[in-house]
Structure formats: C-alpha cells, structure tokens
Amino acid sequence: LNKKDRKPLIIRGARQVGKTWLVRELAKKCKKQVIEINFEKNLGYKDFFSSNNPYDMISIIEVAMNVSIDPSDAILFLDEVQVVPEILSKLRWFAEEMPHLPVIATGSLLDFVLNDHKFSMPVGRISYLYLEPFSFEEFLEVTDNDKLLDYIHAYEFGQNVPDILHQQLLDLLKYYRVIGGMPAVLGNWVDNRSLLEVNQIQHDLLTTYIEDFAKYPTRIMKDLLNDVMKAVPNLLGKKCKYSLINADVKSDALKNAIDLLGQARLVHKIIFTDANSVPLAAQTNNRYFKLILNDIGLAMASMGGVASDNIIHTQLSNEGGLSEQFVGQQIRTLDPFHIDPKLFYWTNPKYGSEAEVDYVIQYQHHIVPVEVKSGSSGHLRSLHSMMSKKNHQVALRFNADVPSVTNIQEYNYTLVSLPQYMVGQTYRLLESVFYAI
C-alpha cells in the first residue's frame, strides 16, 4: 500500500491457504474501503471490466454496487479471478492510468490459468506475492508460545539449550506435524484443542481439493489427480517413480497430473540439481524428483487414522519421510514473499549409486546441502560423498538434537546441526557460521 511504484498485485497460493482473509484483514487494519468483486459468486461482474479505461470501470462498479469509491482510500479486490482470467489483462490499465488505486487479485487454482493463459498478460505491470501455510514459528506464535519463539529467535551458537526447553519444542513440533499450517485447521485448534475436529477439517479440505479438480475436466481425469494426491504421503522421502503412483497409467499422464497439482500448489516437486554453482535452478534435471504435499497436517490426515494426544509419544511408521516433508515445507517459507519458493535435492546419477542428499539450498552465493534426520543421530555417508565431490564449505543437518557446529576434517567441511524446530532460523544462523570461516 505504501509503495510509490505500486502495481496491481496477484497473491498466489493453494486453495484455503488464507488469501481472501489476508486481503480483508489488510483493508480492516489499514482502514481502507474494500471493493470485493467475487467472480465465482457472480459471473456477471465481468461486465464491469468491458472497457479499457479504469475510470469507466470504477464508475460502473459504483453504480452497480451502490457505493462511492475514493481510489486513494480503497482497495479493489478481485477474488476467484480464475473464473474469468481474461480480466487479468485489464490490470495493465490500472497500473498505467490509475496507480493510486491498490488492486489485488487472488483465486483458487489461479496458477492453472497463469501457466496456460490464452490472453495477453500485462508483463512488467503486475507484482506477485506467494502465500504458504503457517510455518512452525507462526504456529508457536498463534498457540501462545511466544516466549519459546523469542528464545529461538535469540539463540546463538555456543549457548546451552536447556533440556526442558528442547523437549517442549520437540513436543510442540509433533503437534504441528499432526495439525499442520492450514489456517482453518490451526484456527480450530487454537479455539477448541480437539484433534478429532482438526482431523475432520483436514479431510474436508482434502475433499474440497478433489472436488475442485472436476472444474477442469478437459485437462486431466479427476481420478488421476486423486491418485497422485493419495500417493504422495506414502512417497515422502523417496525418489518418485510413476509406477508407485499407478502402474496401469502411462507416465506422460501421471507427469501431467503432477505438474497440474504443482501449479495448484497442492504438491511440491523437489527437483534434482547438480549443485555445482548458483543459481540452483540452472542445473536441474526434471527426470529425478521427489514429492511432498503442501501441508504436513494434510499429509498425516491423508495417511489415515485419527490422531490423539498420545501422538507425541508414538513412533510413526514413516518418521523419516515426515521429517523431510516438515523441513521442505519450512524451507519454502525462508525467502522473501515475492520469491516463488522452489525445492531442490542432490543424488549421484551414476548407475548403482545410492548417494542422496535430502535438500540443497542457496544462502547468498553459497550452496548448502541439507540432510534431514528424524532422530538425534544417523549416518551421513551421502552427505560426505556429496561434500567430497563438490567442495562446498558448509553443510546443514536437521535432526532432533541440540544445535552444534562441527568441523568434519576428513571431508574438509563444516557441519551445522540444528533441531528441526529451528528451520526458520536457518539463514540467520548460517550467516554467523560463514562469517566465522
């Protein structure tokens, strides 16, 4: 709202991740009039934008909706814009002729449209922001664990982490794995503290996603999208093979389904990178990839069963895969909101090799391999193999132990170990490590 070079804004994110609420809350907190145009509720609203003159468009809206609009004191909110995607081409006129009116557009499955539009997008005249589910640190904030959050934010290497605080954070992390970061689910947990109700809302969300696919019958079969969604929780931590999803369907069709779910931001690909230099995305091979869901709570719900409070004392069957889901989901929240988050990993493509490093991230101009462990220990053969081949300075391990920094002399690198509950502090703590090298 305060930018002098403001452009119309498109907020991109999965369905039910909180885009509409966010715009309404922005208007409320900033005391702005919000002019909400929901094209799904009323397709006739598209007629407001038949002109290329934004002043004419606003005049029609004023008459049709019986409101007076002061562009300098209002927000024009175009919701469910994927219903009439050609409206997006009109945003250029607001950028050029009415920049003093903030315009925000959102929509469910909007990325389907943006990846396959048949109209002229106003390149250079639109800004994008990317919205993810609540991170673990945001989970701590909304569940009134502010002091623990402050402790994480203030932690520096060399400080002792009291066992009681370490255990509290690990326990809360286990609750987050069940609840996840979807706003409706988390809001219900804050109000009612019922894992049964949490589970019901999660299944409602999963059903809503599947029903949404029926709106796009010409793109791919609803059943195939459903197959992928159900398969991903069982593939966490594994290199994806199409036969593991549905052995009776051609790989091209499954690839299409995965790509569509990626565009909908319901499934995220972890793509192979050679990790020789930055940027990581310039050295990828799409033949090798892994998958996670957009939210760990939905992944847990999709795997079946209703959680209870004793979940924090239970060893789950796929601890390693769930840990990779959690860390990947948190990594997607590390960069500024204007960056479309991507996930990468490394594997030795040599036939017969089993070396695989769970994630690779870029911190400033540094490449940092990331290993994920569900417990406090575990071998690091793959990480050692990668570090010996690539000669990177620092590697990162997320596990269930307290923080540490170790010089791995045999392979000539520094290993930074962080508990999984500190993923959100990755960049801050890496800065101190690189500064000390």
Image (spheres, rainbow, N blue to C red):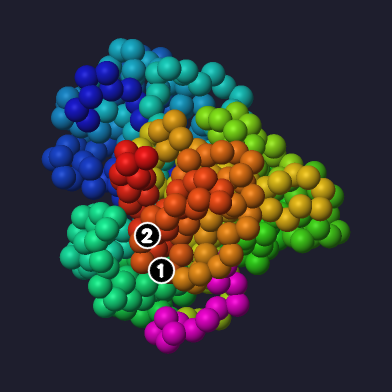
Cα gap from disc 2 to disc 1, whole angstroms: 9 Å
Residue pointed to by mark 2: 404
Measuring from the top left, give residue 234's x and y in whole percent.
65, 67
Q: Residues within 10 Å of mark 1 (few under 14, many from 20)?
A: some
Examine the structure image and report whether residue 177 is included in the region drawn in magenta.
no
Identify which residue, 319 or 31, lies in the foreground: 319
Report which quarter residue 37 is drawn in: top left
Identify which residue, 239 or 340, lies in the foreground: 239
Apparent side of residue 387 relative to residue 87 in the rendered image (left or right): right
User: Which image quadrant: the N terminus?
Assistant: top left
Identify which residue, 234 or 224, lies in the foreground: 234
Under tag 1, what secondary structure?
A: loop
Marks 2 & 1, CB-CB < 8 Å contact: yes
Q: Amino acid at mark 2?
A: Ser
Measuring from the top left, give residue 47's x and y in whole percent.
43, 28
Q: Which mark is residue 209?
A: none
The magenta stretch spans which residues?
308-321
Measuring from the top left, give residue 285's x and y in whole percent.
69, 37
Q: Identify the residue at horizontal 43%, vertical 17% (top origin).
A: 124
Q: Identify the residue at horizontal 47%, vertical 71% (top origin).
A: 376
Residue pointed to by mark 1: 401
Under tag 2, what secondary structure?
A: strand
Examine the structure image and report whether residue 313 is included in the region drawn in magenta.
yes
